[in-house]
Image: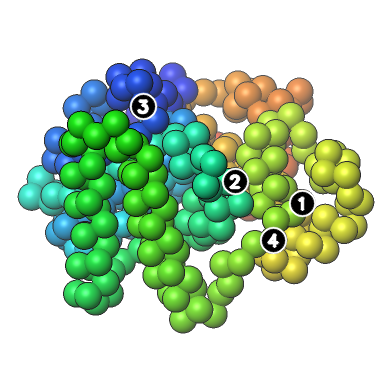
C-alpha cells in the first residue's frame, strides 16, 4: 500500500546540494540521495540517457522500456519511477529553467521542445542509427568534460551545448512525429496557455479565466488550441486536472475528500462526478485498478 504522505517532490538545490543550476552525473552514480525506483517528482528538468537496454521507466502511468541509446525527458512535477537493470549505464542531466533560459535562449525555446511540459507528446527519443548515436554521445561527452573542468565560463558553454543537444533531440522527435502522422508544432499562444494551465489548474477551472488573463476571447483561445492540438481548451485543462488526480490517487492513500480539497473542490461529490465523467471510473475504482495494473 502506498504511503498516505504526498508524492515526494525534490528541490534542485536541496537534492543536489549545488550552488549552480546544472548537474551532470553518470547514471550508475546518480540517485544516491533517494531511491528513484519509488514514485517521486522534482521541480527541475531531467534528461536520462541510457547506453544499454534493460528495465523500465514509468512516467505518469505509462511504462516505457529502457532501450539502448535512448533519451527520456522528465519535466518539473511529472511523477516517475525508474527501474533499470543494474548493468544499464548512462548519464543524468539535471537543470533548472533559469539555467537554460538566458540572454541567448528565451522561453520560446523551451516551448519549442515538444517533449517537455507536454503530456500529449512521447517523452522518449531513440537514436535510430549509429551515426546519430555517435553525434549525440559526442555532445554529451563535451558537456561532461566542461562540467568537470575548472574554466570560469564553463556553465555558459554547457548551456550552449545543452541547447545543441536538445535541438538534436527535437529533430529526432519531430521526424518520429511525422512518421506517426502527428504534428509537434505549437503556437506561442498555445504554449502560454499550457504554461498557465500548469501553474493555475488547481485554482482556475474555467477557460474564460485563462482567456481573460491572456487578454483574448475564450472563442479565440479555443480556436487556436483546437488548430494546434486537435482538442478544445477545456479538454487540455480538464486533462491536466485528471492527471493530477490520478497521481494523487495512485501514489498516496489520501482520502477522496482530501484529494478533492487538494484540487480545490469544495464538494467531494462534485470532484468524483467530474472524475467519472472524464475517465469512466470513480476515483476509488481507478485507484484499485491502477494499483493492480502497475504493481
Quadrant (top left/top right/bottom left/bottom right) for the C terminus: top left
Which of the marked residues, 1 or 3, is nearer the chain's N terminus?
3
Callout 2: SS: helix
Which of the marked residues, 3 or 2, is nearer the chain's N terminus?
3
Left or right, 125 with respect to 215, comes to: left
Q: Nearer the viewer, mark 4 or mark 3?
A: 3
Q: Residue furthest front?
A: 152
Q: Quadrant of residue 199?
A: top right
Q: Are marks 2 and 1 in contact (CB under 8 Å)?
A: no
Pinpoint residue 66: horizontal percent, then vertical percent: 24, 57
- Distance from the alpha carbon under mark 3 to that under mark 2: 20 Å
Compared with 203, 86 (above or below) is: below
Q: Residue at x 44, y 76 (%)?
A: 175
Quadrant (top left/top right/bottom left/bottom right) for the N terminus: top left
Pinpoint residue 158: horizontal percent, then vertical percent: 33, 44
Q: Which residue is mark 3?
A: 20
Q: Which residue is mark 4?
A: 187
Left or right, 217 with respect to 158, comes to: right
Q: Which residue is mark 1?
A: 234
Pinpoint residue 100: horizontal percent, then vertical percent: 46, 42
Q: Nearer the viewer, mark 1 or mark 3?
A: 3
Q: Which residue is mark 2?
A: 107
- Distance from the alpha carbon under mark 4 to that under mark 3: 32 Å
Residue situated in front as seen by the camera: 151 or 126: 151
Q: Are marks 3 and 2 in contact (CB under 8 Å)?
A: no
Q: Residue at x 18, y 44 (%)?
A: 145
Amino acid at each position: 500500500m502506498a504511503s498516505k504522505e504526498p508524492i515526494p517532490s525534490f528541490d534542485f538545490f536541496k537534492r543536489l546540494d549545488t550552488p549552480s543550476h546544472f548537474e551532470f552525473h553518470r547514471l550508475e552514480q546518480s540517485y544516491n540521495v533517494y531511491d528513484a525506483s519509488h514514485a517521486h517528482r522534482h521541480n527541475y528538468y531531467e534528461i536520462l540517457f541510457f547506453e544499454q537496454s534493460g528495465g523500465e521507466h514509468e512516467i505518469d502511468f505509462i511504462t516505457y522500456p529502457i532501450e539502448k541509446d535512448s533519451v527520456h525527458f522528465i519535466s518539473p512535477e511529472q511523477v516517475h519511477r525508474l527501474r533499470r537493470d543494474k548493468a544499464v549505464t548512462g548519464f543524468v542531466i539535471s537543470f533548472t529553467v533559469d539555467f537554460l533560459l538566458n540572454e541567448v535562449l528565451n522561453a520560446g525555446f523551451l516551448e519549442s521542445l515538444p517533449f517537455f511540459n507536454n503530456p500529449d507528446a512521447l517523452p522518449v527519443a531513440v537514436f535510430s542509427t549509429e551515426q546519430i548515436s555517435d553525434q549525440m554521445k559526442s555532445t554529451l561527452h563535451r558537456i561532461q568534460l566542461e562540467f568537470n573542468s575548472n574554466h570560469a565560463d564553463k556553465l555558459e558553454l554547457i548551456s550552449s551545448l545543452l541547447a545543441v543537444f536538445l535541438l538534436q533531440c527535437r529533430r529526432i522527435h519531430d521526424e518520429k512525429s511525422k512518421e506517426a502522422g502527428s504534428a509537434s508544432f505549437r503556437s506561442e499562444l498555445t504554449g502560454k496557455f499550457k504554461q498557465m494551465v500548469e501553474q493555475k489548474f488547481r485554482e482556475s477551472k474555467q477557460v474564460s479565466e485563462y482567456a481573460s488573463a491572456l487578454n483574448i476571447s475564450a472563442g479565440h483561445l479555443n480556436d487556436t488550441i483546437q488548430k494546434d492540438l486537435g482538442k478544445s481548451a477545456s479538454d487540455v485543462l480538464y486533462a491536466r486536472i485528471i492527471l493530477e488526480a490520478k497521481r494523487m490517487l495512485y501514489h498516496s492513500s489520501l482520502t477522496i475528500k482530501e484529494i478533492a480539497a487538494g484540487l480545490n473542490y469544495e464538494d467531494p461529490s462534485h470532484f468524483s462526478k467530474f472524475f467519472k465523467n472524464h475517465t469512466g471510473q470513480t476515483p476509488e475504482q481507478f485507484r484499485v485498478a491502477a494499483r493492480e495494473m502497475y504493481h
